[in-house]
Image (cartoon, rainbow, N blue to C red):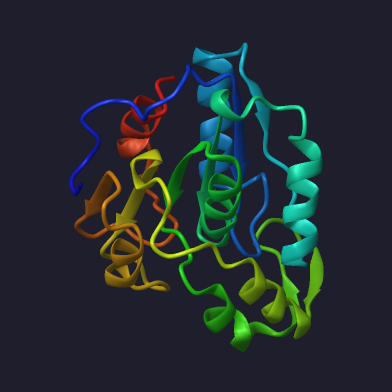
Amino acid sequence: MSGPPTGRAPGAPVTHLLYLHGFRSSPRSTKAERMRAWVQAHRPELEWLCPQLPPSPQAAIDGLFAATAGWPRERMAVIGSSLGGFYATVVAERTGCRAVLLNPAVEPARDLAAHIGEQTAWHGDERFFFRAEFIDELRALAPPAPLTRPERYFAVIAKGDELLSWREMSGRYAGSPMRLIEGSDHALTDFETWLPEVTGFLGL
């Protein structure tokens, strides 16, 4: 369905929440910090995990599954921004958990091919090297299309995204609950406005 969610996603109450940042980002991103603060204020009993993701997509996914190996699949959820939205989709497709996607990358193998080489992280002066073989890893990780259980996804997509196509994003998650924003930007600097819909969808 299109439009914002009218109720929470199917499944048992969420007890474990994973947040995945985007390319060149970190757990110190504004959205990650805001989500962490909300959890601390409203649901401090939640198991919260927002790891620093390595440059290698395969290493990132392997690390995520290792870190959440003991999490109950029906009671976990994942939120992902940009490249983290791609990873969140991989996690949700493999586990059946619920997912919220914030301006999610749809074709990161294509889009990040122009970024091979040394990169500087957005937060701090950390540098890392994005290798050519990481593009192949992204291709190998690509989740199926169409999604197996679209009702378990909620996509927040900004038409004003300056990096990713809102049409491509909304097409990828067609059939899922969706908030299509007029304006805004890739960073979703108005994330606070949509936070109640995010938490409501997850039943938090």
- Most foreground residue, 41 or 93: 93
Identify which residue is drawn at 58% across, 78% down.
109
- Most foreground residue, 145 or 113: 145
Residue sitting at the far front: 148
Above or below, 154 relative to 84: above
Above or below, 54 relative to 113: above
**Relative image position of residue 59 (x, y in whole percent):** 80, 60
- Most foreground residue, 199 or 12: 12
State left or right for residue 103 relative to residue 70.
left
Above or below, 19 relative to 184: above
State left or right for residue 156 relative to residue 143.
left
Identify which residue is drawn at 39% across, 50% down.
189
**Relative image position of residue 125 (x, y in whole percent):** 77, 63
**Relative image position of residue 57 (x, y in whole percent):** 72, 65
State left or right for residue 108 relative to residue 136.
left
Above or below, 123 relative to 107: above
Identify which residue is drawn at 66% across, 27% down.
48
Tally of numbered tags: 0
Q: Looking at the rendering, in which quadrant would you find the C terminus?
A: top left
State left or right for residue 43 relative to residue 60.
left
> Is residue 166 shown to the viewer in this render?
yes
**Relative image position of residue 198 (x, y in whole percent):** 38, 34
Identify which residue is drawn at 25% across, 35% down.
5
> Is residue 54 shown to the viewer in this render?
no
